[in-house]
């Protein structure tokens, strides 16, 4: 019998650590973590977490090694609600990155805590800054 979407997410949650917006927010001042927004470009441009880089879920396997070459780097992925980032995090782990987590509840959870989002001053153009 084929796996359902619910089954898939449950299986991925067994391997990918999830972290709340409070923990991510607390770490912003400390640095050291790479924040990756895996939403679509328009979503990122509309508002993203401070310091986050954009690599959409569609391009994560292709561009991650270029953007984050050290596979020991702590990485937190997020999306709008926590599902795309969870699935992307599993893919990143398959590439050999060992310190990967997904932000549960995504940007929705971030905003629910009253945390600010950053907007780009000018729209991103091309793959050089965003994918």
Image (cartoon, helix red, strand yellow):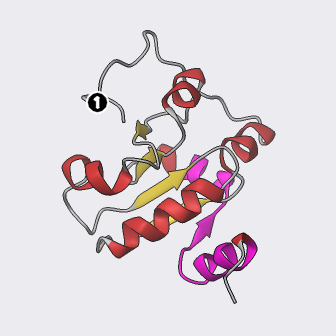
Looking at the picture, how far across and down is residue 104, in whole percent? 67, 59
> Is residue 53 shown left or right of residue 71?
right
* Above or below, 37 relative to 43: below
> Is residue 19 shown left or right of residue 100?
right
Determine the residue located farthest toward the bottom in the rendered image: 1
* Above or below, 55 relative to 19: above
> Is residue 13 shown left or right of residue 42?
right
- In the rendered structure, which segment of residues is drawn in magenta? 6-26
Residue toward you, 111 or 12:
12
At a point 66% along the width and 51% down the height, the residue shown is 21
Q: Name which quarter of the figure residue 93 lies in.
A: bottom left
Determine the residue located farthest toward the right in the rendered image: 112
Count the labels in the image.
1
Q: Is residue 16 magenta?
A: yes
Looking at the picture, how far across and down is residue 89, in whole percent? 48, 64
Residue indicated by mark 1: 127
Few, some or many C-alpha atoms within 10 Å of disc 1 (few <14, some 14-19, many ≥20)?
A: few
Residue toward you, 3 or 99:
3
* Above or below, 117 relative to 53: above
Looking at the picture, how far across and down is residue 71, in whole percent? 25, 67
Looking at the picture, how far across and down is residue 85, in whole percent? 55, 56
Dominant secondary structure (helix, strand or loop) of the stretch shown in magenta? helix
Q: On the rendered image, what quadrant is the C terminus found in?
A: top left
At a point 50% along the width and 54% down the height, the residue shown is 77
Q: Name which quarter of the figure residue 99 lies in.
A: bottom left
The answer to whether residue 30 shows anywhere in this view is: no
Residue toward you, 15 or 58:
58
Q: Secondary structure at mark 1?
A: loop
Q: Name which quarter of the figure residue 127 lies in.
A: top left
* Above or below, 72 relative to 119: below
């Amino acid at each position: 019998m084929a796996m359902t979407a619910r089954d898939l997410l449950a299986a991925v949650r067994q391997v990918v650590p999830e972290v709340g917006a409070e923990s991510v927010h607390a770490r912003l001042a400390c640095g050291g973590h790479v924040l990756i927004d895996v939403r679509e470009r328009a979503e990122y441009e509309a508002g993203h977490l401070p310091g986050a880089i954009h690599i959409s879920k569609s391009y994560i396997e292709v561009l991650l090694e270029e953007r984050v070459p050290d596979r020991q780097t702590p990485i937190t992925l997020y999306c709008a609600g926590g599902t795309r980032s969870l699935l992307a995090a599993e893919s990143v782990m398959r590439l050999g990155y060992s310190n990967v987590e997904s932000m549960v509840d995504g940007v929705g959870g971030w905003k629910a805590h009253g945390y600010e989002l950053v907007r780009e001053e000018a729209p991103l153009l091309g793959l050089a800054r965003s994918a």
